[in-house]
Amino acid sequence: MANTKNFETDIAIVGSGGAGMAAGIEARDSGARTIVFEKSDELGGAAIISGGGCCIVGSPIQKEMGIEDTPDLAFNDWVKWGGPGTDVVWARYYIEHSLHDLYHWAEVQGVKWIDMKPQEGNSVMRWTRPERNGLGLMTNLIDSFREKGGEIINNIEITKIKIKNGRAVGLGGVNTSTGEEINVRSKTVVITTGGFNSNIDMVIEARPEFNEFKVMEGSGRGSTGSGHKMVTEVGGYLTHMENVWFYVYATPDYLYPGHKRGLVCRHIPGYIWVNQQGKRFHNESLSGGNSASPAMLSQTPPHAWAIVDKEMKAFLEIADPYYRNGDQIIREKVEELLENSPYIKKANTLEVLAKEINVDPKTFLNEIERYNAACAEGLENEPDFGKPLKQSKPFDTPPYYGIQFFPLARKNFGGIKTDIRCRVLNKHFEPIEALYAAGEACGMAGGHINGRAGLEGTMLGPSIFSGRVAGGWASNEIGLGSGFIGKPNRT
Ligand SMILES: Cc1cc2nc3c(=O)[nH]c(=O)nc-3n(C[C@H](O)[C@H](O)[C@H](O)COP(=O)(O)OP(=O)(O)OC[C@H]3O[C@@H](n4cnc5c(N)ncnc54)[C@H](O)[C@@H]3O)c2cc1C
């Protein structure tokens, strides 16, 4: 029989991503004994491999660049983008707190914000990047939590929330390296287990229309929806689960069993996408989830070929730790992918490439010809879909590549329903005592803060912020601290 290891703490947090570490820091600041349990041998979840970009409204970086932004402007953009499914209360709460309670708070934990990037749907730039992206951000949060006396134990998979007299009283789990049983007694529990996009069965359950097509897992490896399962087992309510945010510029990871995971391909200026009929269908410079995903998903079948020539290929970046050494792209590994993936075809002429990717050669060559002509004429935008040609060039340098792109489930905009204090709600919308949840497990915050689409930076930002809220109120429930108050920016 397996041994049992017992833990006792004030606050037990499940998951060491952005939400979990923020909850931990807040709980430690309130004076609570806090343990974070992490199932993986690496800390940081999806947050540590993320771009690190957070939507910040009214930041010093915006001011330096002369950008006028206000919570009202951001709120309008947010609701317009997210549609009627947006949780307007949480959206407003996050937007107003993003300056002091995320940007400046993160600085206190050692994070350095360095620049911004434009993102679709925002009337001004707000996607704000920390030094060394998600890695820099999370390393500082993890270090800060530990410096404050917080404990993180990895290789512990939590499988059960223990309830007594309607109240969460601890956790059960297993040590994934020794098989030892884990028993946790705590005064409150915070679930920050991330999303479910690395569990393709859950993705298909949420979006059954994908059953007949290839769709890939695309979040952090630990994002398997285990928190959703544990919370529903104790009566918690899930909401807006169908709001899965897909990206469409990813090709299967042929090294992963069943080729179920996707690799995001970035920074290929000038490339075009064609459908299985050999026709372009979208302005490829708008590659975000709001416009590119519906465009690709309406093709028959819903996949595309990204067409690249030798010169364009030199810029290709693969957003996966195997292909990177910190911020550096390992070019030999990218070459290895291009040469060996069964989802990537290579040819010395465009005619042969058409055959390799099995599209109608006449249609395909005609598309390339029109595109090349627009480049040669020096047009600002190509005439069919309005793609800006500033960074483009004609397809004229063999070898040519066709990289097959399938939809990639990246982010979850639905999940565990909570109130504004991050208390998990049951189907009567009443809180389950001593049980809190935050981050992507809750569709980033509250259940559905983004609605059906995110302005970008609106995943990690709200995950960290709601983690703080959860940690503050989980401490307050046991008589420590005054709950999460923060400092709203209402200018
Ligand atoms: C490649 C990539 C890039 C991204 N870039 C951005 C970006 O630039 N901006 C943005 O806003 N968003 C971005 N996102 C999304 C963002 O990273 C996530 O929404 C965010 O990290 C969610 O934080 P979290 O703490 O809720 O979950 P996570 O960071 O995923 O952490 C959850 C943790 O819980 C652990 N866990 C799960 N189940 C258990 C269990 N049963 N027991 C113990 N531990 C468990 C997991 O292993 C994981 O470590 C990106 C996502 C990806 C995948």
Image: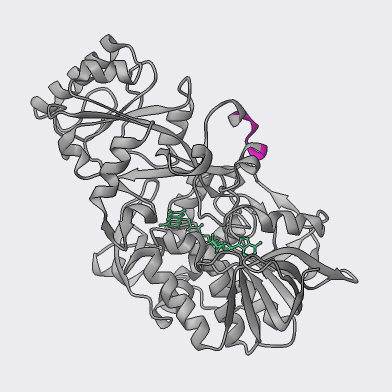
Asked if residue 175 lies left or right of residue 81, the reply is right
Residue 313 seen from this side: yes
Percent position (x, y) of residue 464?
52, 68
- Asked which quadrant contains residue 281, the reply is top left
Q: Which of 256 and 32 is in front in this view?
A: 256
Asked if residue 220 lies left or right of residue 163, the reply is left
- Asked which quadrant contains residue 168, the reply is bottom right
Seen from this angle, which residue lies furthest left? 377
Percent position (x, y) of residue 419?
70, 63
Q: Which of 228 and 7 is in front in this view?
A: 7
Q: Is-magenta flag for residue 208? A: yes
Asked if residue 156 lies left or right of residue 264, the reply is right
Figure check: 154 above or below 128: below
Figure check: 139 above or below 410: below
Secondary structure mostly seen in the magenta stretch? helix
Q: Is-magenta flag for residue 376? A: no
Seen from this angle, which residue lies furthest top? 362
Q: Tell me the quadrant of the picture where the N terminus can be found.
A: bottom right
